[in-house]
Image (cartoon, coloured by chain):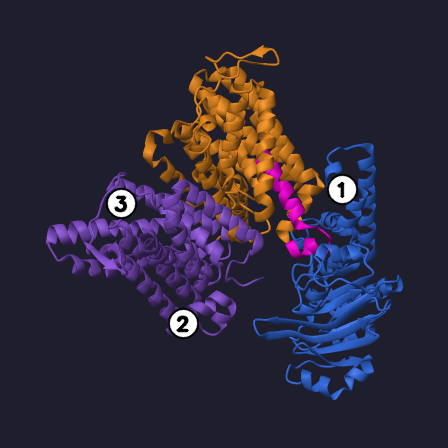
Amino acid sequence: MALLEAKELTKSFGGLWAVNKLNFKIDEGDIVGLIGPNGAGKTTVFNLVTGFIRPNRGRVFFRGLEITGLRPSKIVAKGIARTFQLSTFFSEMTVLENLLVALHLQANQLAPIPYQFIKTQYIRQKEKEIYRSASDLMDFVGLIFYENEKAKNLPHGLQRLLSIAIVLASNPHILLLDEVTSGMNAEEVNSTLGLLREIHRRGKTLLLIEHNMRVAMSLCDRVIVLNYGKKIAEGTPEEISNNEQVISAYLGTGKEFA
Amino acid sequence: MQNKIEKGFWGFLTSIFLMVLAPAFVNTGYSTLVLSWVCLNCVMAASMRFVMLTGHVNFAYGGFVGIGAYTSALLVMRAGLPLCFAVLIAGIVCAIVALGFGLPTLKLKGAYFFMASFGFAEVIRIIFHYFFIDLFGGVDGITGIPYPGSVLGISFDPKRGWGYYYLILLICSLSLWVLYQLEHNTRLGKILMSIQQSESLAESVGITPMTYKVMGFIIGSFFAGVTGSLYSHLIGVIAPEDFTFMFSVYILMYVVIGGKGNFFGPPVGAAFLTFISSFWLKALGFWESVAFAVVMLITILFLPEGLAMLPARISSLLHGIRKTIIEDGENGTT
Amino acid sequence: MTSQLIFNGLMLGAVFSLVALGLVLIFSVMNVVNFAHGEFYTMGGFMAFFIFQNLFVKTLGWPHLFSYFIVLLMTMVLIGTVGFVIEKAIMSSFRDDLLMGMMATIALSIIFSMGMASIFGAGTVQVFHPVPGVMSVLGARVSRGRMFIMIMAVFMCGVLTLFIHKSRLGKAMRACMLNPEVAQLQGINYNFISALGFGIGCALAAVAGLLVVPSCSLNPFVGGGYLMKSFIIVIIGGLGSLPGTIVAGFILGFFESFGSFYFGQPVVILLSFVLIIVMLIVRPQGLMGRAE
């Protein structure tokens, strides 16, 4: 049974087909890339899968159970987490505060809000646990020294690391990452690749939207190519690089391969 | 950031201290009335802003204050309840009404919510004006609301007005403290801030925005009810026309002029404007509201962060001037 | 009686639509909820009082209908310009900030209403109608004045619709409503269009005031009531949709006409509010608004 599956997923905006009868399957442990020219509908796919937009047609399944049209907060609880292209973190809050909020699901399990107002020993204990989880996350991505920095004051590369920490906070099975390396220099891209590989090694499935071909090709086992909302190719990175349709879809946009 | 909050905190304590001492210096009934006003307006401004943390502005706030006022007046006059209970129940009643209003409307986008709350303010006024006249008193409202005679055995002297003033000061300080704690030291506060900064991101970590917006709205409205109750016993007369949209606008003006980005902005704005309007602008009478409107317009055009940020702005301005002078001195002025 | 009510509903509907269209236009083009909108309605009314009645008719002695149309044009141009200038001077700073823009319009509404009260007095004034008398329509006796109002209001709505859909400026405005950034890339001057939109929106409200005032009385504070009605219409019709506004305007017009007769004003307002709450729960985007 596939971990994440989309069947005939379709979304139109006033006559414009952003996503057109898309089918794909992601199995547990995969690293799949989602690529395509600008406007191909990649972020819309993320929005559809994670409940931010309702599809016109088609369905989404997670572990065989239908999740089409569920609210985003419910979908996160099931184990699908995503990042955004913009607003990837809470700009006015510190790194620590960002993660304390991001650990919402864990915090809620330990102590739902109304109980929090009664500051008993029990509550204090739970707060320490959350703090520990936040520290672990910051440690993992390498932000531990920036604990009390306001997120908006961080350099761009570190902000990206913060968004990765945030998406890990909900302890998901599958991470949907939307152009997580954009704006990074080569060194930052390399260390992010290492981070993503480590995340994968720890048992997470990854679905990445990428414009950086080097990242997509070197990291992913499999690549899905979208153009005008339709899947035009799917296969290993080598197969995709040599695919005529894919090359012609990218021609004229000035993108280079590898 | 820590520094600013600490400064604000000390400023807060100092203000409370001054407020406690004030009646010793100004002995007129009017002055104590003004001081009571200041306390109430500070809490109203702060709780209005608390609701604004959810991203919505409640134009029916005045109506909620009215609900608190009417509830408390009726409880004390008809049911013979002691003041402390009346205040509490008034707050709870407001919270319940807020729940009823908030559930269908808080999920709307900003503009729609503004319009809906504007309409709700009208509805509240109409209900108090035209319906249940035997209970609410119609257009004349309720008169002769008793000044609290005693609380917990300490009796108040209505002529000097000190006793009730201290009670109001106590309740208001407590309310401000609670609101501050809620905003800065609880998860609810952090969650509300996160929803305001990026609602989609908040959703993507599992937060259901509606739950917390409703919570914030209820809490803000609770304090509207509390202040409404205290207000009704202070003034003694309440009428439907006292609690309209314009009331909410005034509170909003305190918030905006004081500075909506910071917890201490609205109380500062409220205190400052209440003092000014009570002692100086009253002479303008008719033009008082225009003066307020002009001040607000100027503030949002030229000082959007509000008055509370003025010290910071001035100090950074002075700092910049100092730096320039020093640099010119070092380089030799051109 | 019923036909009277129907006719009244039509008239009210046309007028409400006109006012609400102005509000929706302003919101669609520059993302501002214009709390001063009611005050522009009042201004139109005072144009009728001051310029039409006092200047043209009483002082100059010009014939009624002719002067009325002149005042109509004057109102559109004058109030439109006032709106244009206000947008440029004040509102343009708040294009991105819904709350601050609203606060600015609230401040303006206070300044305007108080200003008008100080100039014209806080009391109620009456303006007589350029088209007096009654006529017979489908067997009912209706006042010709009200017929005139309805026809004019419908006409103005039509003019606006034509402008928005056929003229170059109108198309530019629609582009800005859909996507200001892309519109600017296409070479449209967003600053100008915003100011123009605000000016036109205010002018529409003023024209409505000018039309209606001769049939009803006028005081500096009538604006608030029309503001509230516009809000109700906008919520029912859908904020982004102009045709939805017109439909909702007529719905409210009939609602008011029949409701006022059978239940009285306060109940009507209460019921309208209940109606919008129901609307918001059942169909939050309005009758014809775009679903998010």
User: Is residue A246 placed above or below C95 in the rendered structure?
Assistant: below
Q: Position of residue A121 (x, y in %)?
A: 82, 33
Task: Tell me the CA gap for discs 1 and 3.
Answer: 58 Å
Q: Position of residue C256 (x, y in %)?
A: 39, 49
Q: Which residue is mark 2?
A: C165
Q: Earlier in the sequence, mark 2 or mark 3?
A: 2
Q: Quadrant of residue A179?
A: bottom right
Q: Position of residue A250 (x, y in %)?
A: 68, 82
Q: Describe residue C282's horizontal placement relative to residue A225 as left or right.
A: left
User: Is residue B5 placed above or below B229 in the rendered structure?
Assistant: below
Task: Tell me the CA gap for discs 2 and 3.
Answer: 35 Å
Compare residues C38 and B137 and report the one nearer the observer: B137
Q: Which residue is mark 1?
A: A112
Q: Subunit of mark 2?
A: C
Q: Colour of chain B?
A: orange
Q: Magenta segment, principal secondary structure? A: helix
